[in-house]
């Protein structure tokens, strides 16, 4: 029997999620500020910052996004394993496909 990896703790998982979220907001507000300094109007600058921050975050925030995705995948897999163990305990004669 192989040992199953333990899922990340809730604090680790939520911490990586908050970090990614704060980095996304930070990128948006930095772009918005730069566009305001460049002389664009407030609403237009905000919309342009939103449009620019999406592709930039795909490139610049790839590592934090991958960390969030890996943590989420590990937590989901751990829940599936726990559910399978519970199903096995509740009905050991059931066949699994």
Image (cartoon, helix red, strand yellow):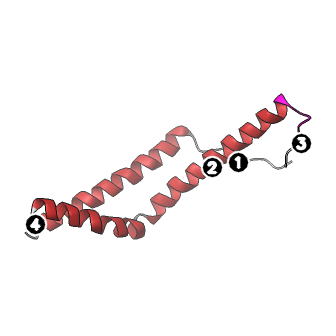
Badge 2: few (under 14), some or many (20 or more) residues near its Cα, within 10 Å? some
Query: Which comes before the other along the chain, label 2 or label 3?
Result: 2
> Where are the magenta residues, as a range?
90-94
* Residue closest to the far right: 93
* Quadrant in which residue 82 is drawn: top right
Residue on which disc 3 sits: 95
Task: Say which mark, if any, is on residue 5.
Answer: 1
Query: Which comes before the other along the chain, label 1 or label 4?
Result: 1
Distance between mark 2 and mark 1 Cα atoms: 8 Å
Give the residue drawn at x 83%, y 31%. Answer: 89
| Rendered position, 90 above or below 62 | above
Give the residue drawn at x 70%, y 43%. Answer: 80
Badge 1: few (under 14), some or many (20 or more) residues near its Cα, within 10 Å? few
Task: Say which mark, if any, is on residue 74.
Answer: 2
Number of the front mark, 2 or 1: 2
Give the residue drawn at x 15%, y 64%. Answer: 44
**Is 77 positioned to the left or the right of 34 in the image?**
right
């Amino acid at each position: 029997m192989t040992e199953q990896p333990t899922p990340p703790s809730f604090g680790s998982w939520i911490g990586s999620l908050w970090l990614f979220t704060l980095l996304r907001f930070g990128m948006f507000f930095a772009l918005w500020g730069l566009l305001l300094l460049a002389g664009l109007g407030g609403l237009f600058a905000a919309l342009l910052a939103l449009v620019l921050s999406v592709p930039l975050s795909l490139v610049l925030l790839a590592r934090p996004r991958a960390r969030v995705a890996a943590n989420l995948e590990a937590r989901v897999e751990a829940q599936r394993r726990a559910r399978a163990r519970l199903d096995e305990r509740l009905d050991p004669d059931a066949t699994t496909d």
